[in-house]
Image (tube, helix red, strand yellow):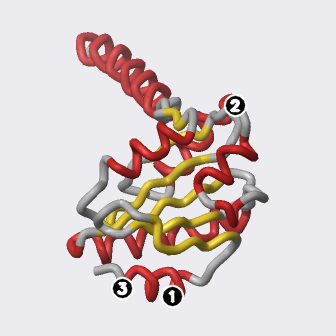
């Protein structure tokens, strides 16, 4: 019995440490427009939905379960979803935890750009406010075809996606 106790203590410690490491997951950084364009280009050949969101944004958090369902429903038809948090770099672990807790099976990134206003306009001139949630749709050739700024019914987003398949 003593041998079992000696074994289980380190195992428990390792389990706790592994959970702590996973909860502090690092998100790749989108540092500028060129970096953002590379992220989108990496999914060329797919229909891409990019959502900019924040942990403090109630509509963003409300959309996430619906986005998980949408991604699951349309993945086989060629949809790739990319989530980019606009949280401060100090809140990176919190953003990673939100993605994990919502079971979002897609790439997550953290936006950390030198000039938010310039970056937002480079993504979409109609997004000068930088308001979140913000969804941008790209066709299979990587061209942005639709933008949704602010809370948008997922049925509206899905209808726009359907036109791209």
Say which residue appears at 49% left-offset and 27% top-offset: 20
User: Does residue 19 sit above or below 150 in this rendering?
Assistant: above
With 133 as the anchor, is 78 left or right in this view? left
Q: Nearer the viewer, mark 2 or mark 1?
A: 2
Classify residue 165 by image quadrant: bottom left
Where is residue 24 shown, x and y percent of the image?
52, 30
Q: Position of residue 46 (x, y in %)?
A: 27, 64
Residue drawn at the location 56% of the way across and 66% of the way down? 135
Residue at position x 61%, y 73% in the image: 148
Residue 155 got which mark? 1
Label 2: how many Cα within 10 Å (few below 14, some 14–19, many 20+): few
Does residue 36 lie above or below 132 as drawn? above
Q: Which mark is residue 114?
A: 2
Q: Residue at x 35, y 14 (%)?
A: 10
Disc 1 on helix, strand or loop? helix
- Give the quadrant of residue 97: top right
Disc 3 designates what residue? Answer: 162
Mark 2 → mark 1, Cα distance in angstroms: 35 Å
Q: Earlier in the sequence, mark 2 or mark 1?
A: 2
Left or right: 2 with respect to 119? left
């Amino acid at each position: 019995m003593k041998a079992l106790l000696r074994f289980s203590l380190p195992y428990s410690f390792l389990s706790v440490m592994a959970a702590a490491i996973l909860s502090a997951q690092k998100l790749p950084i989108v540092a500028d427009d060129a970096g953002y364009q590379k992220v989108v280009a990496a999914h060329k050949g797919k229909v891409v939905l990019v959502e900019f969101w924040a942990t403090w944004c109630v509509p963003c958090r409300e959309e996430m379960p619906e986005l998980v369902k949408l991604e699951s429903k349309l993945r086989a038809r060629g949809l790739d979803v990319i989530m980019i948090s606009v949280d401060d770099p100090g809140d990176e672990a919190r953003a990673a935890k939100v993605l994990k807790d919502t079971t979002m099976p897609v790439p997550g990134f953290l936006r950390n750009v030198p000039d938010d206003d310039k970056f937002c306009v480079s993504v979409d001139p109609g997004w000068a406010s930088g308001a979140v949630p913000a969804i941008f749709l790209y066709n299979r050739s990587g061209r942005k075809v639709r933008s949704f700024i602010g809370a948008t019914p997922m049925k509206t987003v899905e209808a726009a996606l359907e036109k791209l398949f």
